[in-house]
Image: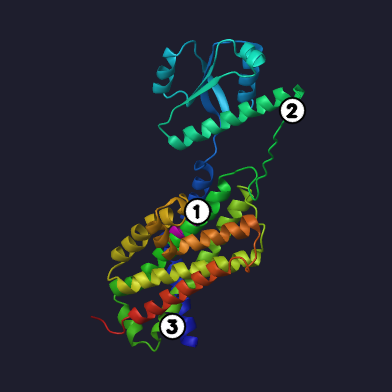
Amino acid sequence: MKRFLGFITKEFYHIFRDKRTMFILFGMPIAQIMLFGFAITNEINNVKIAILDKSKDTETQKIITKINASNYFETQEQITNEAQIESVFKKGKVKAVLIFETDFIKNLEANSKAKVQIITDATDPNVANTVNNYINAILQNYIQEKNKAIKAQYQINTQTQLYYNPSLKSVFTFVPGVMTVILMLLSAMMTSISITREKELGTMEVLLVSPIKPFQVIVGKVFPYIFLSVMNAIIIISLGVFVFGMPIEGSLFLLAFESVLFIITALSLGILISTVSNSQQTAMMISLFGLMLPVIILSGFIFPISSMPLPMQIVSNIIPAKWFIIIVKAVMLKGVTLAVIWKETLILFAMAVLFIGISIKKYKIRLE
C-alpha cells in the first residue's frame, strides 16, 4: 500500500508540473462552458423583420407595436410593395416579412377574418420555423385580447403549462450537455496518453520491474485525474448555477455521486485507449477525434436520439455520455432520486468495470 500511495503521489507531481496539462484541464472547460452558454442558443432575440402594411389602420399599428414590444423582434424596414421583399432578404437585413392585407380592420370587423402573411428566410430552417411560431403566438395573443368583448356560443380554452423549464431557456439544455462533453473528452484524452507517455519517455521499464502490480498501475494512473476531473465538474456546475441560473432541483450528493461515476467511466475508457496505443499521438487521435463526433452527435446533446434512425439509436447505447446527460438533466431539472435513474447508473457502473477490466487484461508486463 505504501508503494501504491507513492506511485499516486508521483502521478500528481507529474501532472502539476506540466503547465500545458493544467491549462487544458482547467482553462479549456471554463472557456467552453462560457462559450456554449452565451453563444449557442435555440432562443431568438431582436430578430430583424420588415413590415408591408397595405391597410395602415389602427389595428395593424397595434399588432406591429405588440410585435416590437416582445423583445423577440425589431422592425428593421417598412416596405411599400412586394417587389422589395426579395431585395431585403438578399441583403440579409431581415429574417421575416409581415404583410397585412388591404382593408385589414374592415375585413376583421365585417367577416371576423383578416389575413396576415408571414414570409421567412429559410436559409436556416430552424430559425425560420422558430420565427414563424413566435409571430403566430403573438398574433394569437392579439386575437384572444380582441375576442374578450365578444360572446360566443361555444368556446374551447386551452391552458399550457411548461414543467422544469417554463422560460424555455436553452442554456438549461446546453449546460448539462457541455458538462458531459467536456468531462468525457478531457478525461479520456488526459488518461489516454498516461501509459503511452511512459513508453515514449522510456520509463515503462521502471514500472515493469517495480513490484507494483498491473491493476495498481491502472488505478494509480486513473486516481489523480479523478480528483482533477471532480474539480472540473465543480467549476462547470458552479458556472452553470451562478452565471446562467441553472437550477439544481435534486440532491447535490446524488449529482456528485453520478458525476464521479461518469468521470471514472471516462477515465477508464482513456486508460483502455492508452493500453492499446503505442504513441501519445495515436492515443490523442483516438481519444479526441475518435470520441468527439460520437459523443456530440449520439449522446442527445444537440440532436434528439428519438429522431435518429433505429440503427443509430442502437449504437447510441454504447456511448457513456448518453446515459450521463439523461442523469444530469433528471437530477438538476426534475429533482429525481436514484430510484428513477438506477438503470442509467447501473449502465455507467458496468461500463466502468468493463473498461478497467479490459485495460488490466491488455496491460503488457513485457516490452515488445
Task: Identify residue for label 1.
Answer: 178
Mark pair 3, 2: CA separation: 79 Å
Residue 226 visible (yes or no): no
Q: Residue furthest front?
A: 153
Whether pointer 3 and pointer 1 mark residues with C-beta atoms closer than 8 Å, the reply is no
238 within the magenta span? no
Crowdedness near tag 1: few (<14), some (14–19) or many (≥20) residues, C-alpha within 10 Å: many
As helix, strand or loop, the secondary structure at mark 2 comes to loop
Task: Identify residue for label 2.
Answer: 153
Task: Identify residue for label 3.
Answer: 216
As helix, strand or loop, the secondary structure at mark 1 comes to helix
Kind of residue sitting beneath label 1 = Val
Residue 223, horizontal then vertical, whole percent: 48, 74
Crowdedness near tag 2: few (<14), some (14–19) or many (≥20) residues, C-alpha within 10 Å: few
Residue sitting at 66 percent across and 64 percent down? 251
Of badges 3 and 1, the one in the foreground is 1
Of badges 3 and 2, the one in the foreground is 2
Image vertical order of residue 22 relative to residue 33, above or below: below
Residue 152 visible (yes or no): yes
User: Which of the marked residues, 3 or 2, is nearer the chain's N terminus?
Assistant: 2
Query: Which quarter shows the C terminus?
Result: bottom left
Residue sitting at 39 percent across and 83 percent down? 214
Residue 136, horizontal then vertical, whole percent: 58, 29
User: Which of the marked residues, 3 or 1, is nearer the chain's N terminus?
Assistant: 1
- Residue 94 shown left or right of residue 280 in the figure: right
